[in-house]
Image (cartoon, rainbow, N blue to C red):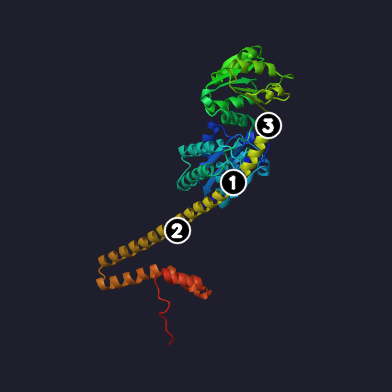
């Protein structure tokens, strides 16, 4: 059986092509059914995300070219375009690749955790469609176990590698219990929305959104179950928040030193954590001069992100060692399965030969042949049939002077190599 992986990802193709080869939840069902009909394809799983489309197939022969043609035909694209922007992996390299992908080592952001859930969903969809059997059951379950080990035994996902996530992690470091804290988000763009998602995941207590355009603030607030403020209300309500994170397109600061100073006075000097993700700045730099105000800019956070990326690179090296060891574990299991299948075939063939000769003997007895003649012929014919294969290989090994194979066969057949004597 040959394991083949064919894929297109963020490293090999632009987003315009990745969009064309992606599978929707509806088209995925049809795609798996179509793959199942291909000659030689026994098992298949399709992984499709915004950054990659990968097809994993287990079959009787090398499937890479057939899969490229299938992918091009399914999406009505030129196969030359697919071939030019894709990669093809087989056997151990395909095993290593799926483990690296699941562990976040092949992601756009090193160590990102979402891909593992996406692969689990792809496996579940394939299993539901009836395209997963013994080999892929073992491969993907083992892959999930490896990815879990990588997350728990290395620091691959421990440090923030986006400015938005770094801001939330820093807030968590300063205020250990975020569910008890109130957060004001100034702005309603993509960066603030990403920050908000991270904050919700941390279970922050209260959220409010302030924006120049109230309608945009309300649209974001509805997703977050948050309050809405106008920018003109900032001086009045700033005191109500422990954490302020701002990212707008304003050309002038929205939060000045005096505003923060008054808020701290009303808070009776309870500390405030402020993060300015805007360029130009939304928060005056002089706020840092205040004793109970902790202001971080986008440059501060970018420095943290760079340090964390370096840390993840080191963790990735540890992860690669874990993955290589586990690739070997899977391949050893696969080899053992192959041996089990050979044993099963060998025993089946022996019993089939036995049954054929026994049936022949019964027919001879029914035709009146003496029992002694039937038994002698049965013993002779059955022995010859069972010894034919091993005898042929022994002769070939001897003719080729293959001492290692001759010795191994002798041990396997329980033969005494020292029984021969010179005459």
Residue under numbered circle 3 = 300
| Horizontal relation, residue 310 to residue 127: left or right | right
Q: Is residue 60 visible?
A: no
The residue closer to the viewer here, 161 or 343, is: 161
Mark 3, mark 2: which one is toward the viewer? 3
**Dot 1: element:** helix
Q: Position of residue 15 (x, y in %)?
A: 66, 34
Identify the residue at horizontal 32%, vertical 71% (top origin). Answer: 379
Q: CA distance from mark 2 to mark 1?
A: 29 Å
Q: Position of residue 31 (x, y in %)?
A: 54, 37
The residue closer to the viewer here, 382 or 201, is: 201
Q: Earlier in the sequence, mark 2 or mark 1?
A: 1
Image marks 1 and 3: residues in contact by CB distance under 8 Å: no
Mark 1 packing: few (<14 Cα in 10 Å), some, or many (20+)?
few
Q: Earlier in the sequence, mark 1 or mark 3?
A: 1
Mark 2 packing: few (<14 Cα in 10 Å), some, or many (20+)?
few
| Horizontal relation, residue 123 to residue 279: left or right | left
**Dot 3: element:** helix
Identify the residue at horizontal 57%, vertical 50% (top origin). Answer: 321
Q: Is residue 366 above or below residue 58?
A: below
The residue closer to the viewer here, 121 or 285, is: 285
Q: Position of residue 281 (x, y in %)?
A: 72, 23
Residue under numbered circle 1 = 66
Q: Is residue 365 visible?
A: yes
Q: Quadrant of the C terminus?
A: bottom left
Q: CA distance from mark 3 to mark 2?
A: 58 Å
Mark 1, mark 3: which one is toward the viewer? 3
Q: Is residue 294 above or below residue 330?
A: above
**Dot 2: element:** helix
Residue under numbered circle 2 = 339
């Amino acid at each position: 059986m040959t394991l083949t992986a064919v894929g297109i990802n963020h490293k090999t193709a632009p987003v315009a092509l990745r969009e064309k080869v992606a599978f929707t939840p509806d088209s995925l069902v049809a795609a798996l059914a179509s793959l199942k009909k291909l000659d030689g394809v026994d098992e298949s799983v399709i992984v499709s995300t915004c950054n990659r489309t990968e097809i994993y197939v287990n079959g009787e022969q090398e499937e890479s070219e057939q899969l490229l043609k299938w992918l091009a035909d399914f999406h009505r694209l030129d196969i030359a375009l697919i071939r030019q922007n894709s990669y093809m992996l087989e056997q151990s390299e395909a095993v290593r690749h799926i483990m690296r992908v699941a562990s976040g080592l092949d992601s756009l952001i090193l160590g990102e955790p979402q891909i593992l859930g996406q692969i689990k969903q792809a496996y579940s969809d394939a299993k539901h469609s009836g395209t997963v059997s013994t080999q892929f059951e073992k491969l993907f379950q083992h892959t999930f176990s490896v990815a879990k080990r990588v997350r728990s035994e290395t620091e691959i996902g421990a440090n923030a590698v986006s400015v938005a996530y770094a801001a939330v992690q820093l807030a968590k470091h300063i205020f250990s219990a975020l569910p008890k804290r109130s957060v004001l988000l100034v702005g309603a763009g993509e960066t603030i929305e990403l920050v908000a998602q991270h904050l919700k995941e941390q279970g922050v207590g209260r959220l409010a959104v302030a924006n120049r355009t109230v309608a945009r603030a309300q649209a974001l607030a509805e997703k977050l179950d948050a309050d809405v403020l106008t920018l003109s209300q900032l001086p009045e309500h700033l005191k109500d928040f422990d954490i302020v994170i701002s990212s707008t397109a304003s050309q002038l600061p929205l939060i000045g030193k005096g505003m923060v100073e008054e808020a701290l006075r009303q808070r009776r000097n309870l500390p405030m954590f402020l993060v300015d993700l805007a360029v130009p700045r939304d928060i005056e730099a002089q706020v840092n001069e205040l004793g109970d105000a902790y202001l971080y800019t986008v440059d501060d956070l970018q420095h943290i992100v760079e340090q964390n990326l370096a840390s993840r690179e080191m963790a990735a090296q540890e992860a690669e060692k874990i993955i290589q060891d586990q690739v070997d574990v899977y391949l050893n299991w696969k080899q053992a399965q192959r041996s089990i299948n050979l044993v099963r075939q060998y025993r089946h063939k022996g019993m089939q030969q036995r049954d054929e000769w026994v049936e022949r003997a019964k027919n001879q007895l029914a035709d009146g042949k003496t029992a002694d003649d039937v038994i002698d012929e049965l013993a002779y014919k059955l022995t010859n049939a069972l010894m034919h294969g091993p005898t042929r290989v022994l002769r070939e090994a001897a003719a080729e002077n293959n001492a290692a194979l001759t010795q191994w066969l002798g041990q396997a057949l329980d033969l005494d190599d020292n029984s021969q004597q010179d005459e």
